Image (spheres, coloured by chain):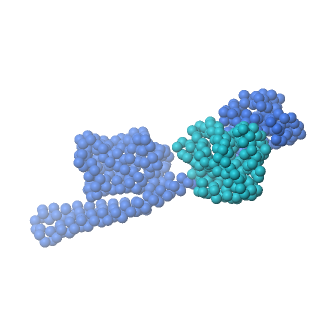
Chain colours: A cyan, B blue
Amino acid sequence: MCMIVDDEFRDAITEIINIGVGKAAGLLNEITGSHIQLRVPELRLVPIGEIADVYKTVLGTDILSTVMQEFQGNFSGVTALVFPQDSALSLVNLLSGDQSPATDMDSVQVETLKEVGNIIINAVMGSISNVLSEHFSFSLPVYYEGQLSSIAANHLTSEEDAWVVIARTQFLIESMQIEGTILLVLEVGSMEQLMKSLRKTNG
Amino acid sequence: MENPGGPVISTECLALLDMLPSGIVIIRNDFSILFWNRCLEEWTGIKKGEILEKNLLLEFPTLNQPTVATRLPQVFAVETPVYLSSKFHPHLIPALLPDGISRVQRGAVLPVRLGGDEVHAMLVIEDVTDLSHQITGFQNMRDIARRELAERKKAEEALQIANAKLSLFSVITLQDIRNQLTAARGYNYLLSHSLNDITEIQSTAGKIDRQLSLIEKYISLMLDFEQLGKEPPQWYSLRQVIKQAMVQVQFFQVTSGPEIEDLRIYCPPLLEHIFANFLENAKWHGKTTTQVRISFGTRGDTGILTVGDDGVGVPAQDKERIFREGLGTKTKLTLYHTREVFAITGISIRETGVTGKGARFEIVIPRDGYRFMRVLPGEKPQEPE
């Protein structure tokens, strides 16, 4: 499937996501008492079928911890915050001040990651909603872990022609850098709708 | 803004919410309470009639924190649900269990409509006390198991190092025994072939006896070293060690500060001999020693144990030489052995005294090599913990 995405669109969506993560960073600072910076240095658009390969290239692994929320409105899909499993645990431990040497997350740590994901996803989607004057309804955050190809097929979308906005996200916390990604999975037709809304907003 | 058809709650549904085992409160966008379910009545003892129309945030300061309060407006404006984990918000609406323990809670705030277009926020609170305590219990058990495993691994590694040192000590000691035997054989040759004068014969026999005493000392030392290869390092009560060393050397002019009372050191076996060696050194080499003082302090995380006396001290040129192999004939264990044994658990030692004012040994112990723990009545000295 062919999708023509111009730089203007890419820049606009990067800016909107950056506004969202900026707000999220402020809130995470409040909650954790740690100084947290969030950055989105890179954004890509790929068909859903290529996501596992692209992700492996970007982060070097496809075994992941994922917090996701569905959204529905003029355009619909799933927004997810995705981390390599060990990074997710490091992030939760850093944010909660725990020193757990465990390699698997317990349910309290999963809850913590769900709240972090909820804060970031809400901020990003709130930013999209505000800028585009679009209204969505959202599900509560859910957590999945495993291979991205399996998560994508079972929980992100069953549509082969769906598109994904992949926003690399860097968490800078107390001199440590943890890398994750925000995925904006758009159902068939939603990408065109998003581009249309952006063009309308930009006049 | 178009109504996207989010959750609509009817009056019948409100009656259902009253029966759920989760705390549920519905608020308007000015935070005034519209609905307060029976579960919350039970948890808090606050009846509907007392709380309806009041401002939720003003009633419950735990919710009136930026970490919650700043996120509520987005529920009304953008209709994004807010998730509140038990890690960051364990007591959303403080409530005690019948046994007086605070309930641990987690929650979510969802946008809802009660018939009309106005968006309300429904805070749903789950009691996760049992789950939370189970996880804490599991984490504690896991941490204990992990600590024990790390300690065992450390002990095994130390035992390996100790065995390597033991081989070295054995070679050195056997060499010493051979030297004494050669000397004794020489004296014996003199006795058999050259000496006729009774005084000379007695003097040479005395020399042979001294060689044999030294051989006996070395054999006894080798037997002590055997412990090094058999027993892993343990936590030793320093107070007990000092007491035993005093008895062994019959030197009782030892003072120590209160900080020594509960101090324990992680060290291979022979700590008692090491301290006996310090006291013997003070007694023999200190010449004018009247007192030995033992104290403990910290430098950063590192523990500093000092053993000082008021004798003649160690000449500047000998401060490092005294730790060399083969020196120290008065005592069973030498400072060379002391340094090597300490090194097994990462402890170092140096002499920092002022010549003429007394010897002072500074023993530097890593953070994981010392702790404070009271010796229980009836506890055997040098028992592993």
Toward which corner of the image does residue B101 lie, by quadrant? top right
Taking depth in this image into account, of B341 and B183 the one nearest to the observer is B341
Q: Is residue B280 left or right of residue B69?
A: left
Q: Is residue B228 above or below residue A105?
A: below
Taking depth in this image into account, of B186 and B37 the one nearest to the observer is B37
Q: Residue furthest bottom?
A: B193
Toward which corner of the image does residue B260 lie, by quadrant? top left
Tally the numbered discs.
0
Taking depth in this image into account, of A110 and B227 the one nearest to the observer is A110
Q: Is residue B224 visible?
A: yes
Provide residue A110's location: percent of width, then percent of height: 67, 49
Q: Residue furthest right?
A: B12
The residue under the point 27% across, 58% down is B326
Q: Residue furthest left?
A: B197
Q: Is residue B103 visible?
A: no
Provide residue B172's location: percent of width, then percent of height: 30, 63
From the image, which quarter does the N terminus of chain B lie in?
A: top right
Q: Is residue A95 left or right of residue A74?
A: left
Q: Is residue B78 left or right of residue B274?
A: right
The residue under the point 78% across, 38% down is B111
The residue under the point 24% across, 42% down is B355
Taking depth in this image into account, of A158 and B288 the one nearest to the observer is A158
Q: Is residue A57 left or right of residue A192?
A: left
Toward which corner of the image does residue A134 lie, by quadrant? top right
The residue under the point 86% across, 35% down is B116
Provide residue B4's location: percent of width, then percent of height: 82, 41
Provide residue B210's location: percent of width, then percent of height: 23, 61
